[in-house]
Image (tube, rainbow, N blue to C red):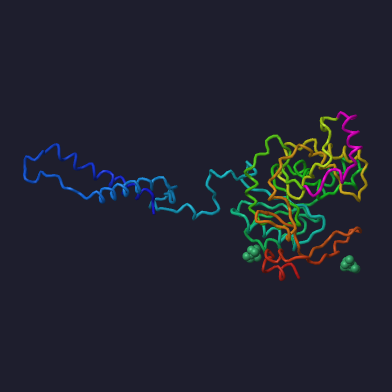
Amino acid sequence: MSSSYMSWRSSATNRRPTQPPDDTPKNPGSIHPDLNQDPNPKPALHFLAFVLIVFLGLLQFLPASHFRDPADPLRNWVPFNSQPSSPPTTVKLAVDEDDGMIHIVSWMQCLDLKVLAVFTNSTLSSSRYPDLLHFHFFTPQGDEDKVSFFKLKVLFPHSNIDLHGQDEVEEAIKRASSGVEYASLNLEEIAPFIIPSVHQSLRKFIYVSPNLILMGRIEELTGMDLTAHVVAAAEDCSKRLNTYVNSDVLDAIQRSDSKPWISVTPYEKDACMPDLSLLLIDGKKLEEFLEIVLWWSKVLNLRNSERNPAIALALYNRYLKLSDSWLVKEPADITEKSMIIHYDGPKIVCSEFGNDNVSRSPHGNSWLKYLPSMSNQILGS
Ligand SMILES: *[C@@H]1O[C@H](CO)[C@@H](O)[C@H](O)[C@H]1NC(C)=O
Ligand SMILES: *[C@@H]1O[C@H](CO)[C@@H](O)[C@H](O)[C@H]1NC(C)=O
């Protein structure tokens, strides 16, 4: 019901008890002196009327449920929730201040459309405002791969999806690293930090590794203020710094080198590693980032088989920690609060020789829930 109707009722009810005192002083019994005796209402009715007035008065404090569009000539009442795609303006939603969209970026070294479809559907179906999500997938063929693009568009006709190539980003990394440490860098890990410098339109975005299933609302990440931080990420305490880098070497570097990005205090040996599979990135603050990562890779002299801690060191004390619910879990280990899990379906893994067809069989069935119903016809089984 409209609140203005209620307020009319309540003000009318409020006025009524004040009328008798208005009348009585004016005619103090001159016309019908025999009727002058005050009626004697029951105290229970008094109380009931009072409660009713208070109740009707309180109704005005309920949030407005309907509104009238000033442009509508009939001035019809429209419920607020009939427009799910336009959130109330008080919700701080936009990741990108320019276009109000939430940009979601992912990088896939070997194209696997089934994984992308599950990721996309899980994100869309957990989201409150799916119309505001804009997916950017960096794939080997990128926008030249029209077939993959149209397959995704058939599965998700109302979504915003762009495919981008990977060459420009790879070139930028190769150029900066002069080829030497390039092999020690995991492109899926470093790419999100380089994308803003190559694609000027992507400044603020959420980076998500595609091998994930989202169960929480991605919008919950977007109201976050990064302030002085470069990125936001969850902290993974099952992985500690000293498993990836020798603490003595790190101490020696910390004492003897004076680069501005080195911590002034000694590094905590068992510091938790940032989980790089979900990041909130503000490209404006990333200027030196690649240089720092390359510098760490160089001084630590890492081989390419190991997981490179250079990104974790570059982020040391410089990232905003996301709540634990955004830490990626295995489907078997989830708690009520878990927002995000590993993809557990079949997937294509890049082989060493560049063949894209080493497939890994499923180890769970969480992915089936988000597999679009048409995916067998469209993507092949
Ligand atoms: C990949 O595909 C090629 C040709 O399509 C085939 O010869 C090769 O055995 C496949 N490799 C794997 C690991 O499936
Ligand atoms: C995506 O997943 C939801 C929830 O599991 C499912 O109901 C829906 O049909 C899927 N979307 C598409 C496009 O198939």
Helix, strand or loop for the magenta stretch, by majority: helix
Bounds of the magenta segment: 237-258
Q: Residue 222 in the image: x percent, y percent?
A: 64, 45
Q: Residue 362 in the image: x percent, y percent?
A: 78, 66
Identity of the residue drawn at 25% across and 48% down? 46
Pick the residue in front: 43 or 244.
Answer: 43
In the picture provided, is 58 more to the left or to the right than 128? left
Pick the residue in front: 216 or 294.
Answer: 216
In the picture provided, is 199 more to the left or to the right than 23? right
Q: Quadrant of the N terminus?
A: bottom left
Q: Is residue 291 above or below residue 165?
A: above
Q: Is residue 226 magenta?
A: no
Q: Is residue 23 above or below residue 76?
A: above
Q: Is residue 251 magenta?
A: yes
Kindly indicate the quadrant of the structure image that contains residue 194: top right
Identity of the residue drawn at 66% across and 57% down? 215
Identity of the residue drawn at 82% across and 58% down? 110
Q: How many marks?
A: 0
Pick the residue in front: 196 or 277.
Answer: 277
Q: Is residue 54 above or below residue 369?
A: above
Kindly indicate the quadrant of the structure image that contains residue 99: top right
Residue found farthest to the front = 43
Q: Quadrant of the C terminus?
A: bottom right
